[in-house]
Structure formats: structure tokens, C-alpha cells
């Protein structure tokens, strides 16, 4: 598996475990973990929340698109994407050419429990975050389903999710 240079791309809604599972996978395969949102924040010198507020979502999505193009040209990465990267079909296709796509899925209730104490989620800065999760998640579901493999993360540890991904990747 360590000789396989295809990227491992982790899609999914916020709170589904992309970053956590990505860290375990990258450690096990001795690969670089690329957190797309963290790279954008570093390059812009602003948090994602601040980018959304000051520049708007279209600006953020353009930054995200450029980063997808950049990462798709590289090999042997574990990429934890932002939750909305699937909104642009070109992002999915670019990543598909360079790796194996995994969608991490969780029920809205699980997402809410995992994210309710976090303050860096601009799309959940609302009076009713649970309602907002459902509103955002439902239209994205068919886009997440375009991944090569769907991994349900409800009631699973980070280790179990990572192990499932690694097992599939070794056979893909």
C-alpha cells in the first residue's frame, strides 16, 4: 500500500470525521495530510469564518477551486477537503483523476453533536444549527454519493473509520 501513489481524498459534510480519520491514515501510510481549509486560512491570513464574512462564499469557493487544481497535480497525499468542495463538479473530477474518493457520511444528529461546541463553522452560525445542518446536508448528499466509496461514521471511532478506509484503499 505504501508504494501506491494515488491520493486518498476525504469528502464529507463538516463533522463527519475527515480531519480526524485523515490524521490516522496519513500517519499509518507515512504520507502528508493536507487540510484544505487550513491551507486556505494560512494563505489568506484569515479564518474561514472571516473569509466568508469579509469576502463572501463565492470568493472562498474560488480559492478552494484553485487549491483543488494544485493538489490534484500531486501524488501520495491524504486530502481532507472542506465540506462544500463537492459543490463544484470540476473539483470531484479533478480529484478522481489523482486518487480514490471517500465520502464520510453521518446523520444530521451526529454532525450536530460533533460540532455544537465549535465556533469556527461559519455556516452553522445561526439560531437553529440543527435545522441549518439538515438544510445544507440534504442537497449535498447526491454530490457526496459521487465518491468511489461511502463510509458511514456514526457510532464508529476514528480508528475504525481509518481502518475501513485503509482496507478499501488497499483493494481499490
Image: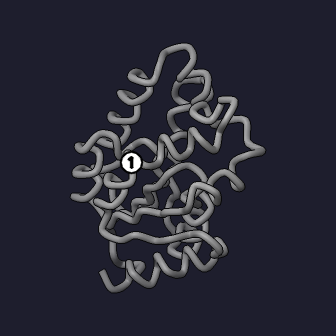
The one of 46 and 82 positioned closer to us in this rendering: 82
Q: How many marks?
A: 1
Which percent across, then down, holds residue 55? 49, 15
Residue drawn at x 69%, y 48% is 115
Label 1, residues with CA under 10 Å away: few <14, some 14-19, many ≥20: some
The answer to whether residue 100 is above or below residue 68 is: below
Residue with the most extreme top position: 54
The one of 83 and 131 positioned closer to us in this rendering: 131
Give the labeled residue for mark 1.
140
Which percent across, then down, holds residue 65? 33, 35
The one of 46 and 5 positioned closer to us in this rendering: 46
* Residue 21 appears left or right of 86: right
Residue drawn at x 53%, y 40% is 37
Which quarter of the image is occupied by the C terminus? Answer: bottom left
* Residue 136 appears left or right of 96: right
Residue drawn at x 35%, y 46% is 86
Where disc 1 sits, the SS reads helix
The answer to whether residue 105 is above or below residue 119 is: below
Residue with the most extreme right position: 117
In which image quadrant can residue 84 be found?
top left
What is the image's colouring? one colour
Which percent across, then down, holds residue 19? 58, 56
* Residue 42 appears left or right of 169: right
Amino acid at each position: 500500500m505504501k508504494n501506491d501513489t494515488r491520493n486518498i481524498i476525504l469528502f464529507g459534510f463538516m463533522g463527519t470525521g475527515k480531519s480526524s480519520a485523515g490524521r490516522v491514515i496519513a500517519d499509518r501510510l507515512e504520507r502528508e495530510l493536507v487540510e484544505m481549509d487550513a491551507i486556505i486560512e494560512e494563505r489568506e491570513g484569515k479564518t474561514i469564518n472571516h473569509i466568508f464574512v469579509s469576502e463572501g462564499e463565492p470568493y472562498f469557493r474560488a480559492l478552494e477551486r484553485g487549491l483543488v487544481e494544485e493538489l490534484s497535480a500531486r501524488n501520495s497525499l491524504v486530502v481532507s477537503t472542506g465540506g462544500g468542495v463537492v459543490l463544484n463538479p470540476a473539483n470531484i473530477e479533478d480529484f478522481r483523476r489523482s486518487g480514490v474518493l471517500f465520502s464520510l457520511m453521518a446523520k444530521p444528529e451526529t454532525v450536530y453533536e460533533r460540532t455544537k461546541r465549535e465556533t469556527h463553522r461559519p455556516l452553522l452560525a445561526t439560531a437553529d444549527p440543527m435545522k441549518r445542518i439538515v438544510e445544507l446536508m440534504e442537497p449535498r448528499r447526491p454530490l457526496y454519493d459521487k465518491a468511489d466509496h461511502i463510509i458511514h461514521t456514526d457510532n464508529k471511532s476514528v480508528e475504525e473509520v481509518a481502518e475501513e478506509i485503509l482496507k478499501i484503499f488497499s483493494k481499490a
